[in-house]
Amino acid sequence: MSEIISLKQKRHQKELKYEKKMLRELTLAEIKAKIDECFSGFSSSVKKNVIEDGCVDFAIEAFMLGAKYSRFGYLGETMEAANSRCYHEEKQLTDELYDYYINWGKYRGSDSSLEEVHLACEHYIHSWWKQGYMKGEKRYKLRLH
């Protein structure tokens, strides 16, 4: 007799399988290069080795969020429309990265530079979301999902 699996479990298994496939598209070298690109202006007032691990985690989360919403692009929506669907999740990731960067990185800067850090965090998260979206949409088009 075969094992009975609920629909919820089946969806979760399928989602994990998709995430594993998508993570093969991502390299640590790409992530580290993007960290240097986005946060190089603040490196003197932040402990880089401390925040790098967190930035990698946030990059993966944003990448996977974009990949998840790439399905809508495959179904005909524009990237902007799909991005507006996940506005709150992306904003939450941005705010969490900002808090992490300020607190764990022991950032010491002026109030005006805090806004620049937030903009850098926003750019970092959105660029990873966009890359995940494009690679996910490509996988859907090639029927590799």
Image (cartoon, rainbow, N blue to C red):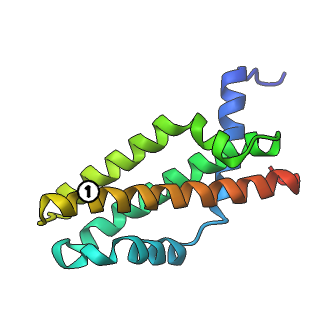
Q: In the displayed structure, would residue 28 be above or below residue 137?
A: below
For residue 71, what is the image quadrant?
Answer: top right
**Residue at 60% of width from left, 57% of height from top?**
130
> Which of the two residues, 37 or 23, is positioned nearer the viewer here?
37
Residue 85, quarter of picture: top right
Left or right relative to 70: residue 118 = left
Residue 80 in picture, x, y percent from top left: 64, 45
> Could you say whether the residue bearing mark 1 is in a helix, strand or loop?
helix
Residue at horizontal 18%, vertical 60%?
112
Question: Residue sitting at 42 percent across and 42 percent down?
Answer: 91
Measured as percent of width and height from the top left, residue 95 is found at 33, 46
Q: Which residue is mark 1?
A: 115
For image coordinates 66% across by 23% down, the residue present is 8
Q: Residue furthest front?
A: 112
- The one nearer the camera, 69 or 23, is 69
Residue 66 drawn above or below residue 53: above
Does the rendering let one see residue 16? no
